[in-house]
Amino acid sequence: MTDRLYYTDARLDRFTAAVLDITDDGRRVVLDRTAFYPTSGGQPHDVGTLGGIAVVDVIDEDERIAHCLADPIGVPVGSMLVGQVDMTRRVDHMQQHTGQHLLSAMLTDEFGWPTVSVHFGDDTNTVDVACENFDPTTLAAIERRANALIVQNRRVTVSFENAAEATGLRKPSDRDGELRIVTIDGLDRSACGGTHVDGTGEIGALLLRRAEKTKGHTRIEFVCGHRAVSRARLDAELLTKAARTLSAAPHDLPGLVEQQMQRLTEGERERKRLAGELARYQATAMWTASVPDSDGVRRIVTSVTGAVKDAEPLAQQLVALGSCAVVVTNTEAGGVLMATAAGIDAGQRLRTALQSVGGRGGGSPRLAQGTVPDPSQLHLVLEQLGFLPPLPEPLA
Ligand SMILES: [Zn+2]
């Protein structure tokens, strides 16, 4: 059985302990006591060193705690080892965890939203609360209130009480026997095995980042302590960078971005209008230059460097002028577009022609498009569509 030293002293970072058990590969060690916190109750495990070797994972095995090492440790059972917990990571977890107790208590008492679940991540944390219709404008008010409670520096204490006698718990515990109870003076009493700071002032700050709907609940993202500051710093840098691109002050960004979006929409509308006008001019010129066959049908073929789909306005302008069949190709990508207004079924004709060379495509009787696997086969498709004279047979 491992004695959990972090239960009574969350600030203990260096300790000596005896090896109770060790795996054959020397990478998994059980001690008689440890200050290393194992992943449990949503709080991630500690890291640090044991006998000078990096501890990469700490696992709760109910009665015992296993320390997973980066390299094998060559000591027998009964040896004494020195453990060193990485306190930067530990203190960060203490701040996140205590911040969560405070936030959950406040959201229940003042907003009527009990916590449904909690997640602590490497970057950010979330609480899911029983609130169906969350108003995003409340976020700032919750954050203000949480930080006011932090500044009051209420004492955070740990006590061990019998489950049958413990009163005033936020959530009744389903455990028997002795409970470890974490109390925030005048605010919260919760059964919890995690590591916490000694006063709410040590949480430092609580930053709410956003809230989103999730399965009938609301998920609130938050960060505490140093992490709140570094996150806010990162946000400020991102804003500054975006503002610099627009030669503006960060404060003016929302209005400016909206303005730019509007200009972009207007610009795109104008571009489409001009493209339509250009297509009309090109169509008239091509119509004039083409000669109708004996049935009065003009066969017009042209090619583009971009996507054949972009030539749709031109093809539509042409078929609007009278009896014709238009084919647009892209000789690099192997794309074909066909438009007709001459009683010819473009969809059916193009599909058949493409299939004959292993290509794919189709569309409506008036407009169709597709591709060939090898662009050098495009002339075969055009030939099938009646647009080109057959290539001369190669000389034997
Ligand atoms: Zn806790």
Image (cartoon, grey):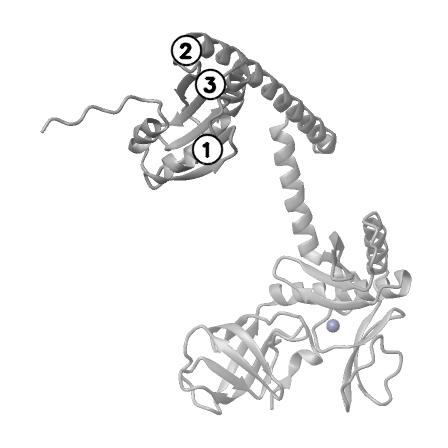
For this orientation, the residue located farthest to the front is 295
Looking at the rendered image, the disc whose residue lies closer to the viewer, 1 or 3, is 3
Marks 3/2: CA–CA distance: 10 Å
Residue located beneath label 2 in the image: 290
Residue located beneath label 3 in the image: 324
For this orientation, the residue located farthest to the left is 396
**Residue at the image position 42 percent from the left and 32 percent from the top:** 349
Q: Earlier in the sequence, mark 1 or mark 3?
A: 3
Q: Earlier in the sequence, mark 3 or mark 2?
A: 2
Q: Is residue 95 left or right of residue 63?
A: right
Figure quadrant of residue 72: bottom left
**Do labels 1 and 3 touch, CB within 8 Å?**
no
Q: Where is residue 273 in the image (x, y as percent from the top left)?
A: 61, 18
Task: Give the camera-side residue of 264 and 287.
Answer: 287
Q: Position of residue 86 (x, y in %)?
A: 57, 68
Give the secondary structure at mark 3: strand
**Do labels 3 and 2 touch, CB within 8 Å?**
yes
Q: Where is residue 235 in the image (x, y as percent from the top left)?
A: 66, 44
Q: What residue type is labelled 1?
A: Gln
Q: Is residue 40 left or right of residue 330?
A: right
